[in-house]
Image (cartoon, grey):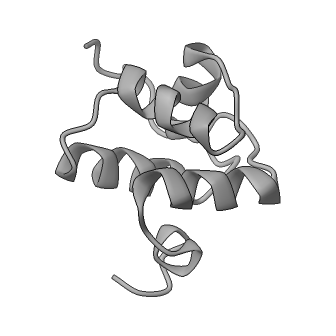
Amino acid sequence: MRHRKEPPGDKNIIGTRVIAIRKVKRMKQKDFLARLQTFGLDISPTSLSRLEGQYRLVQDYEVVAIAKALDVSVGELLGESE
């Protein structure tokens, strides 16, 4: 896995949380993408990388699918409860 050279972007607030939760659950991006598909969200590896790097806007339905795929609440994903 390559590390980011640039600082995080400012297009969303969930990117860094997605990475942190995914790593705590020991889930690789490839496995996470497969889980997202089971919840009806089909995005490319590049798109996920941009989302995690906060360089991509996130739609509301995507937030719901991401939370389900990570088995966390939407509130937790948004930083309401930690």
Residue sticking out furthest to the front: 38
Quadrant of the rendered image containing residue 46: top right
Residue 14 visible: no
Quadrant into which the C terminus falls: bottom left
Q: Residue at x 74, y 48 (%)?
A: 58
Relative to 26, does residue 12 appear above or below in the rendering? below
- On the rendered structure, is 65 left or right of 18? right
Number of on-image labels: 0
In the image, 68: left or right of 21?
Answer: right
Instruction: Note whether 11 is above or below 71 in the view shown.
Output: above
Front-lying residue, 14 or 6: 14
Quadrant into which the N terminus falls = top left
Say whether residue 82 is visible.
yes
| Residue 19, percent from left and from top | 36, 44
User: Going by the image, does 4 lie left or right of 55?
Assistant: left
Vertical relation: 63 (above or below) 45: below
User: Looking at the image, which residue is at 43% across and 34% down?
Assistant: 32
Q: Residue at x 42, y 54 (%)?
A: 70
